[in-house]
Image (cartoon, helix red, strand yellow):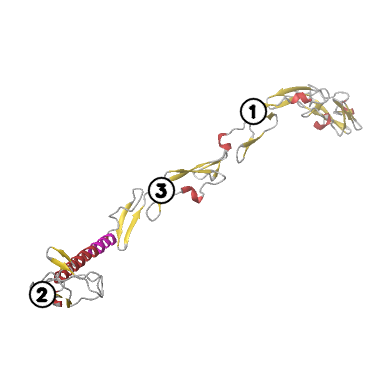
Amino acid sequence: MADRKGIRLFTTPQSQMAAYVNATYETSSDVNLVPEETPSVYESLRIPHPTDNADDPNIRITQPPKTKVNRRLQIALVLVGIICAGLFAVVVWSLVHTLEEKNMNGCLNNPCAGGATCRKTHDGFDCICPPGLSGKLCQLARDPCRSQPCRNGAACRNQSETYLCSCPSGYTGRNCETMTNHCLSLPCKNGASCVNLAASFLCSCTSGFHGPRCEDDINECLSTPCTLGATCRNSYGGFHCSCPRGFTGTYCHLEISECSSRPCQNGGTCVDMVNSYRCLCPTGYQGSNCQEGYQCRSRPCQNGATCRSYANTYYCSCPSGYIGRDCESG
């Protein structure tokens, strides 16, 4: 037994841990007893041991009525429960209200990236992406070269909101789809034909010219094209052979036929010779061209008339102003 401010503490033989904080003597008022770590509460306990109190050696410990035990504690617990329930309700309401606001207006936190415009919808929001961006939140940079728009081996380069095709030689257009017409500038000279190619052009030169653009004249006389010793004279784009008498042609390779003009008359036969011819006259005719018959040998026609022999006779072709068989009358 120990004294503390006039209060004595007792323990029971059955449980050394059963201690009562407050005890009353027989003549004192009731004080609540709070057991510490005891499974049960005793209503009364008598201790037959001698005490310092000579008047009453037996000390009795009593428990207050059950209705009075921990009254204040119960009230405190009820108040704490009410406060906790209120706080919990406030927290739940705040969370629900916040979620409802977010669902009603998903644009409050500005979820769209890249300066995109946020638009509320009935079930959330949509991001209206600016050019060059894509994705739910416009967080993806659009690659215009992904679709491979450039053709004919052209390189594609991103240009912010669009693309640029670096065309290889020979192609043009936004997507390098058009073959360049190199012949539009008329690169071929001296009447040459231009053939357009993929990356360049080809000039088909006319005779007498050569070079990439047919700009150079060929000196044909260097190859000695003229025959029979004819003189070759080079000209712009060609040459000329000065043929000897009796020959003709580009290279003087053709002999001139003096009989081609039919010089022999009165049925005479023309024999071609080098630089000349000979007429074989029929009977009754003579002359270099068989133009004279035997009847004309005596020159019967006068005043410059032309005599034409006909078998056994002759005929005088009179000049102007003369008449008569022999053109004798003027």
Horizontal relation, residue 166 to residue 9: left or right: right
Mark sitting earlier along the chain (1/3): 3
Horizontal relation, residue 51 to residue 318: left or right: left
Asked whether 153 or 183 is in front, the reply is: 153
* Boundaries of the magenta span: 93-103
Identify the residue shown where x is 23% and y is 76%.
40
Disc 3 + disc 2, Cβ < 8 Å: no
Number of the label disc, if any, that sits on residue 56 = 2
Mark sitting earlier along the chain (3/2): 2
Q: CA distance from mark 1 to mark 3?
A: 53 Å
Amino acid, disc 1: Glu
Q: Nearer the viewer, mark 1 or mark 3?
A: 3
Q: Is residue 102 magenta?
A: yes
Number of the label disc, if any, that sits on residue 132 = 3
Reply above or below: 74 against 305: below
Q: Quadrant of residue 271?
A: top right
Residue 219 spot, x, y in % from top left:
72, 24
Asked whether 112 or 308 is in front, the reply is: 112
Q: Quadrant of the C terminus?
A: top right
Residue 157 spot, x, y in % from top left:
49, 43
Q: CA distance from mark 3 to mark 2?
A: 102 Å
Q: Is residue 96 magenta?
A: yes
Q: Nearer the viewer, mark 1 or mark 2?
A: 2
Q: Nearer the viewer, mark 3 or mark 2?
A: 2
